[in-house]
Amino acid sequence: MTEQMKFSVVCSLFTWMQRSKSLAKKRSKFRKFLDSFCNPRDYFTAIRLVLPNLDRERGTYGLKESVLATCLIDALGMSRDSQDALRLLNWRKGGAQTGANAGNFSLVAAEVLQCRQGMASGGLTIKDVNDLLDRLSSSENRAEKTSVLSTLINKTNAQEMKWIIMIILKDLKLGISEKSIFHEFHPDAEDLFNVTCDLKLVCEKLRDRTQRHNRQVCY
């Protein structure tokens, strides 16, 4: 099942797509990912991580960069005035303190996490990640959110955590548009989403890429 796929597989897809300069190759790689690793009965479990800004099933996290920085500092047990804590809090600023990745919160966070997490994958499945992200979005206060982030940090490596942070911020920077993702998934996916604004419904109704649908029978 798709939900038993290791999250590390998704991270490998993201890393490859981010590094590739060819849109055609990105689209082909995404299609191969769907065909090789996803169960057509459960595309949504994976695609909601690829298009986090379109996922309406999960509530908002209430974690913009400044709040996320504070939660990560607490989750890592760092002093608020430590060098790495200041790097997270001042992620927008350039200079020696923040480093070459200033302005990109996820990369600054990955650098801070690098020396605190092992290189080995924590072995989380996509279901594990989605369940923890559900807990994060439903957490009612900063302490609860910090606790979930601590769990994620303990069960991932820095590379995986970098992508989780980007999912939380709803911006993966893969260099491929939602339109291209939709068109590679199914020729009618973009049209159905534009009508319904329901990513889960799109994934459930358009499981067969070879079968065309019209609006009257899609939902």
Image (cartoon, rainbow, N blue to C red):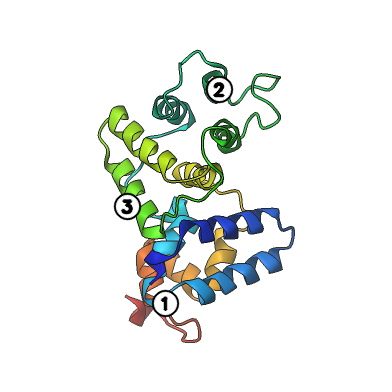
Quadrant the C terminus occupies: bottom left
Q: Secondary structure at mark 1?
A: helix
Q: Secondary structure at mark 3?
A: helix
The residue where tag 2 is placed is: 84
Q: Is residue 105 above or below residue 188?
A: above
Q: Position of residue 214 (x, y in %)?
A: 42, 81
The residue where tag 3 is placed is: 131
| Mark number displayed over residue 195 | none
Query: In which image quadrant can residue 151 be found?
Result: top left
Q: Secondary structure at mark 2?
A: helix
Closer to us: 167 or 184: 167
Q: Amino acid at mark 1?
A: Pro
Q: Residues within 10 Å of mark 3 (few under 14, many from 20)?
A: few
Mark 3 or mark 1: whose residue is earlier in sequence: 1
The residue at the far left in this view is 140
Q: Is residue 195 above or below residue 89?
A: below
Mark 2 or mark 3: whose residue is earlier in sequence: 2
